[in-house]
Every structure is written in structure tokens, then in C-alpha cells.
């Protein structure tokens, strides 16, 4: 009996050793490896919900690509999407939960200049990487920045600056702003005026409205009486849709050029051809780049395949890039250690979907192109063909505020 027992034990040990050395055992162990978890707080409800849903779809695509390629040492990535309700307090609460309760490794997201600052504050305190995918100038400034902060999106200085440099020489120097009264709107006005100074612009008025305004009729007679050369819509999401529609209905286009620093694909789709006809602006991405940029074609085709032929929006593309950048940082660092991933991201030279990009060392701002577009209502090939590309302003630090101006020691 004793001899038989020893033989059985020996067989079990040998079987276990054989199993551990087999591919099947390795795959089982890898499958049980802890996932790389990325928190993704965005405003799934509220006036920016269409843009947030596109961010989420494209972010999921980046996760799938990473996992399909084998992940990192067998570890798969997992996306934890949370609704920040476009509220800074809610965004901070959800982010804290993601870090403390869900144990995320990194955070990507936001769709507001205000919410991204509250997300960043939590991540900075908890020493967690945050890659923001919404426009903000403040997040790059020394008072809000930390080594854990990355800004994948364009910022207002880059976007509104490009629009101003294109529009003012062509349409005139007298400017009126219709501005959403929060950080995004304020920063867009400041950036447009900053660039406009070189052309001698005059601000006739900065007319501010609450976030989520549906009726702009009280503002339109004043705008018309001021008779500007250019009306700049410094608002976003549904606010942009509603203001563009009502400016068109009121006949403002007959006497002034309407521009917007961020001309949203989702807003154009929601508002329609007539409301946006002739409005020009800037964007971080338009799917029509695929005719010029190979990486755009690859990204668009993957998105089409995943989502029934649809094309990605501008902010959707940022969701894709924000996730992809962090995961590429993991692969480059050969580690999930925060400090090693930070170093790896700082060294990235990448082209995920729109041409070459990199992060400026002092403020972790993604240096990238600005695409200038104009809405069209004729000669559209299909429902997705809504913009003409007027110009591509190439990646350059010349159009950005300097590191010293942002308060960084150089």
C-alpha cells in the first residue's frame, strides 16, 4: 500500500510538471492574470452625451486591438466606463471610486474643461496617470499639471489660434463672440483674441450664455446690430447645434461669417446641412483625412468594421488615441509601473490616426495638427460627407504657449 501511494504521488508531481510546461497550462495562467484596468469617466448623460458615446465606442476599439494582439505578457486590458454627468463633483467622485474601489491602473477620459480639472486633481493626489481627451488650456499650466498628467486633446490656444489665423485675414477684423459661460468658452475667446492681435482685431462684444441654453433669441438682435465681420461661436455639443440653427434662421449669415473654434462632427450631424452651411472651424480629426493620411484610413476601416459602417467623430478619435497611448506606454516600458510608463509615454513618437504626434516634455501636451474645415450642403457623397478640408496646420510648438508662460521651469 505504501509503495503504491508513493508511486501515485510521483505520477501526480510529474503530471503537474508536464502540465505547467505545456502551452495549455500557460494559456490558462495567462487568462487568470490580473487585467490592466483603465477608468474612463465621460458625460454619458447631458448635452455632450453624443460625443461621449462616440469616445466610448472608439476607446473600446483600442482596448480590443490591444487584447487581440495578445495584451501585455498575457495580461488583457479592461475599460471601466463611468458617467460623470458633466459635473466636476460627480467626475471627482467617480474617479475616486475607480481608483480606490475598482483599482484601475490608469485613467483616460473627460469631455469638459471643468470636469477634466477635477479628474486630474484626484489622479494627481493618488499618483495615477490621467490622459485627458478634452480641450483645456488650464490643465497644461503649472498649477494644475503634474507628472501624472497627459493631454491627448488639442488645447484652445492651438485650436482657436489656428481658426483665427485662417479666418481674420479672409473675413475681417471686427469680432463678436457668443460664448458658453464656463472654462471652455472663456479659454476659446482668450485664444482667438491672442492670435487675432497679430492682425489687429477688435472685439465688439463677448456675449455669454449659460451652459445648456436652448433659446438664443435674446442675443441675436444685439449681434446683428453690432454688425461684426466674424461671429465666433465659442460653445459645444447641443449648445453649438442650437446656436448655429438659430443664427441661421435669424439671417446672420447674410452679413457676417460664422466660425467656431471646434466644429463638431456630431453637432453637424445633429444640426443638419442648412443650419451649418458655410460655418467654418477647427477640429482635431475628420474622417475625410483618409484620402491623405494612411493611418486615418486604417483607423476608419477598423471603426467601420466594428460599428456597422459608421465613421468615427473627432472626439471619438480622441477616445481611441487616449487609450492607445497609455497602453503603448505599457508596452514600451515593458511594465505597468506608473513611473516607467510615464517615461515611456514621454518618449513616444506616434501616428495612431491623424499623422505624427508626440508629447512636449514640460507639460505633456500632445503636439499635433489642427484641421480647418467648412460645413457643406452640396455634393455630399453620403451622410458622413459633411465637411470640406480647407487646410491642415501641421504639428508645431510655435502655435503653443511656451513652457515658461505656462509656469514651468525650463
Image: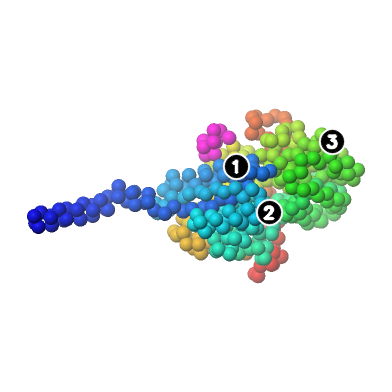
Q: Quadrant of the N terminus?
A: bottom left
In this rendering, position of residue 279 left or right of residue 323 = right
**3D distance between C-alphas at marks 2 and 3:** 30 Å
- Identify the mark nearer the N-term, 2 or 1: 1
| Residue 303 forms part of the magenta stretch | yes
Which residue is under mark 1?
54
The prevailing secondary structure element of the residues shown in magenta is: helix
Q: Which label was assigned to residue 113?
A: 2
Task: Tell me the residue at 50%/54% (across/down).
Answer: 102
Q: Is residue 11 visible?
A: yes
> Residue 148: x and y, percent?
57, 62
Q: Secondary structure at mark 2?
A: helix
In this rendering, position of residue 313 left or right of residue 217 = left
Q: Secondary structure at mark 1?
A: helix
The magenta segment: 301-310
| Mark 3 burial class by Cα count in 10 Å: few <14, some 14-19, many 20+ | some
| Residue at the outermost front position | 1
Please tell me whether residue 358 is drawn above or below residue 225 in the rendered image.
below
> Residue 95: x and y, percent?
57, 55
| Residue 81 forms part of the magenta stretch | no
Task: Tell me the quarter of the picture where residue 373 sits.
Answer: top right
Task: Tell me the residue at 60%/56% (across/down).
Answer: 93
Which residue is under mark 3?
250
Amino acid at each position: 500500500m505504501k509503495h503504491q501511494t508513493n508511486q501515485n504521488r510521483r505520477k501526480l508531481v510529474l503530471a503537474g510538471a508536464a502540465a505547467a510546461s505545456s502551452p495549455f497550462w500557460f494559456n490558462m495562467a495567462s487568462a487568470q492574470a490580473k487585467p490592466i484596468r483603465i477608468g474612463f469617466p465621460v458625460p454619458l448623460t447631458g448635452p455632450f452625451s453624443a460625443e461621449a458615446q462616440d469616445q466610448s465606442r472608439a476607446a473600446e476599439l483600442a482596448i480590443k486591438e490591444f487584447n487581440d494582439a495578445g495584451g501585455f505578457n498575457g495580461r488583457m486590458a479592461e475599460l471601466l466606463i463611468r458617467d460623470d454627468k458633466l459635473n466636476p463633483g460627480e467626475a471627482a467622485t467617480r474617479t475616486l471610486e475607480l481608483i480606490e474601489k475598482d483599482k484601475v491602473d490608469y485613467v483616460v477620459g473627460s469631455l469638459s474643461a471643468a470636469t477634466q480639472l477635477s479628474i486630474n486633481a484626484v489622479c494627481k493626489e493618488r499618483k495615477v496617470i490621467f490622459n485627458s481627451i478634452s480641450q483645456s488650456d488650464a490643465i497644461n499650466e503649472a498649477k494644475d499639471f503634474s507628472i501624472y498628467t497627459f493631454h491627448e486633446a488639442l488645447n484652445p490656444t492651438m485650436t482657436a489660434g489656428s481658426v483665427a489665423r485662417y479666418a481674420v485675414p479672409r473675413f475681417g477684423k471686427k469680432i463678436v463672440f457668443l460664448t458658453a459661460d464656463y472654462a471652455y468658452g472663456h479659454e476659446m475667446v482668450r485664444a482667438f483674441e491672442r492670435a487675432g492681435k497679430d492682425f489687429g482685431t477688435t472685439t465688439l462684444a463677448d456675449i455669454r450664455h449659460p451652459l445648456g441654453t436652448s433659446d438664443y433669441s435674446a442675443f441675436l438682435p444685439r449681434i446683428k446690430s453690432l454688425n461684426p465681420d466674424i461671429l465666433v461661436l465659442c460653445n459645444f455639443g447641443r449648445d453649438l447645434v442650437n446656436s448655429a440653427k438659430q443664427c441661421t434662421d435669424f439671417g446672420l449669415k447674410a452679413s457676417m461669417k460664422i466660425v467656431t473654434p471646434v466644429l463638431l462632427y456630431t453637432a453637424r450631424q445633429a444640426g443638419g446641412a442648412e443650419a451649418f452651411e458655410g460655418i467654418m472651424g477647427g477640429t482635431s480629426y475628420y474622417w475625410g483625412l483618409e484620402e491623405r493620411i494612411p493611418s486615418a484610413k486604417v483607423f476608419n476601416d477598423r471603426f467601420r468594421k466594428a460599428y456597422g459602417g459608421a465613421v468615427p467623430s473627432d472626439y471619438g478619435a480622441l477616445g481611441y488615441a487616449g487609450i492607445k497611448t497609455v497602453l503603448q506606454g505599457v508596452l514600451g516600458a515593458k511594465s505597468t509601473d506608473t513611473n516607467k510608463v510615464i517615461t515611456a509615454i514621454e518618449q513616444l513618437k506616434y501616428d495612431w490616426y491623424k499623422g505624427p504626434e508626440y508629447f512636449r516634455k514640460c507639460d505633456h501636451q500632445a503636439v499635433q495638427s489642427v484641421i480647418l474645415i467648412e460645413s457643406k450642403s452640396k455634393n455630399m457623397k453620403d451622410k458622413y460627407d459633411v465637411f470640406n478640408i480647407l487646410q491642415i496646420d501641421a504639428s508645431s510648438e510655435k502655435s503653443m504657449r511656451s513652457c515658461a508662460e505656462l509656469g514651468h521651469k525650463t
